Amino acid sequence: MSQSDRDLIQNHLARYCFAVDRDGAEAIAALFWEDARLEFNGTHIGREAIRACYEDWINTKRAPVEGLRHMIYVPLIDLNGDEARTETYVDADAHTRRSGRTVLLRSLYRDRLVKRNGEWRFLEREIVPMRSLYDREDGR
């Protein structure tokens, strides 16, 4: 059974979530083209800069939690030949290792994916944080 470009893109979005939950920075960066741009904790241009960003994120943000799960909703995919623009809501949850406190995060992924040699990868990814439903007015 042959997969459509839409299916391949949706699988790529899901593959990213599994990679950030459990894989290393190399595996995450491999989902981006060499000339990609990432907007996440600053601007990172090129696969090596993106790998370094995720290496830092793994060490400082993922390491202190366990059971991390990124869950995406049905993406909006706008296909135009070998290029696609997507917007996808994402929720992530985990527990802190020290206190067991629940961590709940919401974001929006804005992406531009490009198909080269039959393969879809990120050319641009912007991760837009959103306020949690559980945030209090006083920030606690």
Image: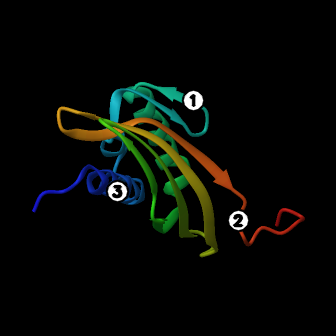
Say the numbered circle drawn on residue 132.
Answer: 2
Say the numbered circle drawn on residue 43.
Answer: 1
- Does residue 106 appear to the left or right of 87 in the view shown? right
The quadrant the N terminus occupies is: bottom left
Q: 23 or 113: nearer the eye?
A: 113
Q: CA distance from mark 2 to mark 1?
A: 23 Å
Say the numbered circle drawn on residue 85.
Answer: none
Question: Counting residues from the N terminus, which is met first, the one under dot 2 or under dot 3?
Answer: 3
Disc 3 to disc 1: CB gap under 8 Å: no
Farthest-out residue, left = 1
- Can you say whether 60 is above or below 14 in the image? above
Q: What's the residue type where badge 2 is placed?
A: Ser
Is label 2 in a helix, a strand or a loop? loop
Q: CA distance from mark 2 to mark 3?
A: 25 Å
Residue 46 locus on image (x, y percent):
41, 25
Disc 3 target residue: 10
Disc 2 to disc 3: CB gap under 8 Å: no
Q: 25 or 46: nearer the eye?
A: 46
Would you call the spot at circle 3 few (<14 residues within 10 Å), some (14-19), or many (20 or more)? Answer: some
Q: What colour scheme has been applied to the protein in the rendered image?
A: rainbow
